Image (tube, rainbow, N blue to C red):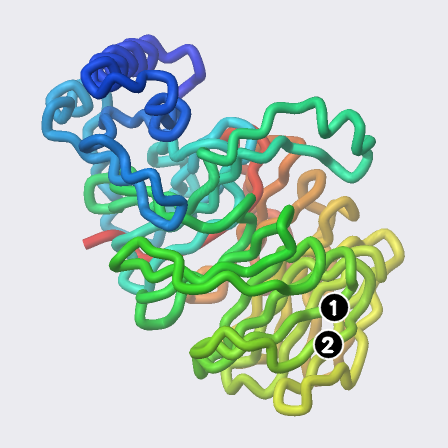
């Protein structure tokens, strides 16, 4: 089960780590600057910061420490992972954690504290690492006036990409991810991250092994969705405000094309051969079909006017596209031969993240306002169960059992 905010074990651990950090800062003779640049209270999972703190914004933060390993073990042991099925990882934006669900039982196995405002989430291809986008920018929904948003506290030291070792179920380090990282994708060789930076209108390329930013690229305004093409050659970055997709060369980082799509594009997926891409246009109630080679929209899939499409998942045979319709409260299945909707089911309020199991029998959706996940049988397009998770679930990733 996920840890409640008033968990006495976690509170005790926060105090222990705070004292340790203050002692180190005093020794260094620069307490205020050390705390401001190095202290990440939301990353407390039983580990303190190692060493003094590299103050370069392009350097990862390593939060392992042998000094507190015994304390950490007393607070949280590594869970026993299920032997069957897979694991569904759910980023909970408001509670700062990730709920982990077993597909064999559809129950929460455990929950991991990762940091502030976890949103984008991915599992490495071998299932051993989990990457989670964290943001120190305040949560400001579209309905909030800019003046009100500006009054909220921004702490850019909390931006980054948390890396979770799933064999031990602990955050092992935090990679730089640029300003306000929201979504990202992982290269097939697990060497690079491509990250969207919503508040700076940029995309950041990160080398995972070194923990360094390789390149920062100006892209479209309010970038969000990020997807690497199956051949690893291109990266799509959706721009919510400019209503387009920036296409990057994955090797050089150069912008090779800009594709106009529908209003407020949120996500993109590719067919397995990489010939077509699909981009969800939230405010246009539609999906743009893109010819990848030509960099142009060749068709538009119209959805119901109540649909506000966000996250998507595609079947391995490229026959079906599943779309989470956000504030439309539904999920739709689309036949990719006819480009028509063949089924729609109501789930929880505002499903954004969506994931498809490897056997393609079930979909999982993150329903933000209701703090739960809907499980949908793909054959019948019916909800079979609902699972309570953390506060304001945002993203979904599905991976194999860590071995």
36 vs 376, left or right, is: left
* Residue 389 visible to the viewer: no
SS at badge 2: strand
* Residue 187 visible to the viewer: yes
Residue indicated by mark 2: 259
Residue indicated by mark 1: 244
Q: Nearer the viewer, residue 252 or 302?
A: 252
Q: In this picture, is 84 found above or below 1?
A: below
Q: In this picture, is 234 found above or below 44?
A: below
Image x and y of residue 73, in percent:
16, 24
- CB atoms of marks 1 and 2 within 8 Å: yes
Image x and y of residue 292, in percent:
63, 85
SS at badge 1: strand
Q: In this picture, is 79 found above or below 282?
A: above
Image x and y of residue 95, in percent:
50, 27
Q: Nearer the viewer, residue 397 or 177?
A: 177
Quadrant position of residue 25 = top left
How packed mark 1 is, by other alpha carbons closer than 10 Å (few <14, some 14-19, many 20 or more), is: many
Tag on residue 24? none
How packed mark 2 is, by other alpha carbons closer than 10 Å (few <14, some 14-19, many 20 or more), is: some
Count of marks overlaid on the render: 2
Q: Nearer the viewer, residue 225 or 372?
A: 225
Q: Nearer the viewer, residue 28 or 204?
A: 28
């Amino acid at each position: 089960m996920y840890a409640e905010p008033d968990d006495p074990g976690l509170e005790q651990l926060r105090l222990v780590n705070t004292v340790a950090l203050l002692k180190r800062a005093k020794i260094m003779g620069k307490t205020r600057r050390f705390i401001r640049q190095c202290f990440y209270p939301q990353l407390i999972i039983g580990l303190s910061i190692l060493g003094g703190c590299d103050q370069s914004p392009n350097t990862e933060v390593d939060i392992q420490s042998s000094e507190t390993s015994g304390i950490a073990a007393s607070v949280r042991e590594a869970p026993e992972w299920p032997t069957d099925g897979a694991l569904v990882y759910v980023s909970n934006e408001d509670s700062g954690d990730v709920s982990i669900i077993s597909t064999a039982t559809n129950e929460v196995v455990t929950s991991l504290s990762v940091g502030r405002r976890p949103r984008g989430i991915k599992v490495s291809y071998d299932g051993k690492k989990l990457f989670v986008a964290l943001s120190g920018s305040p949560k400001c929904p579209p309905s909030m006036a800019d003046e009100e948003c500006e009054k909220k506290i921004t702490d850019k030291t909390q931006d980054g990409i948390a890396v979770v070792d799933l064999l031990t179920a602990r955050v092992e380090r935090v990679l730089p991810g640029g300003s306000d990282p929201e979504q990202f994708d992982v290269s097939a060789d697990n060497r690079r991250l491509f990250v969207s930076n919503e508040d700076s209108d940029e995309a950041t390329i990160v080398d995972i092994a070194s923990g360094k930013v390789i390149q920062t690229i100006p892209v479209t305004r309010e970038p969000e969705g990020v997807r690497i093409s199956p051949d690893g050659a291109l990266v799509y970055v959706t721009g919510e405000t400019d209503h387009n997709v920036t296409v990057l060369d994955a090797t050089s980082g150069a912008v090779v094309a800009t594709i106009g799509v529908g209003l407020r594009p949120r996500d993109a997926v590719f067919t397995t051969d990489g010939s077509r891409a699909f981009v969800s246009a939230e405010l246009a109630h539609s999906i743009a079909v893109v010819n990848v080679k030509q960099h142009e929209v060749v068709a538009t899939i119209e959805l119901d006017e109540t649909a506000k499409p966000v996250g998507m998942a595609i079947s391995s045979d490229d026959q079906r596209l599943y779309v989470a319709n956000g504030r439309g409260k539904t999920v739709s299945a689309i036949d990719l031969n006819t480009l028509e909707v063949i089924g729609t089911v109501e789930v929880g309020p505002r499903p954004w993240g969506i994931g498809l199991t490897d056997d393609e029998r079930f979909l999982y959706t993150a329903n933000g306002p209701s703090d739960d996940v809907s499980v949908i049988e793909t054959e019948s397009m019916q909800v079979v169960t609902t699972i309570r998770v953390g506060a304001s679930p945002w993203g979904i990733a599905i991976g194999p059992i860590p071995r």
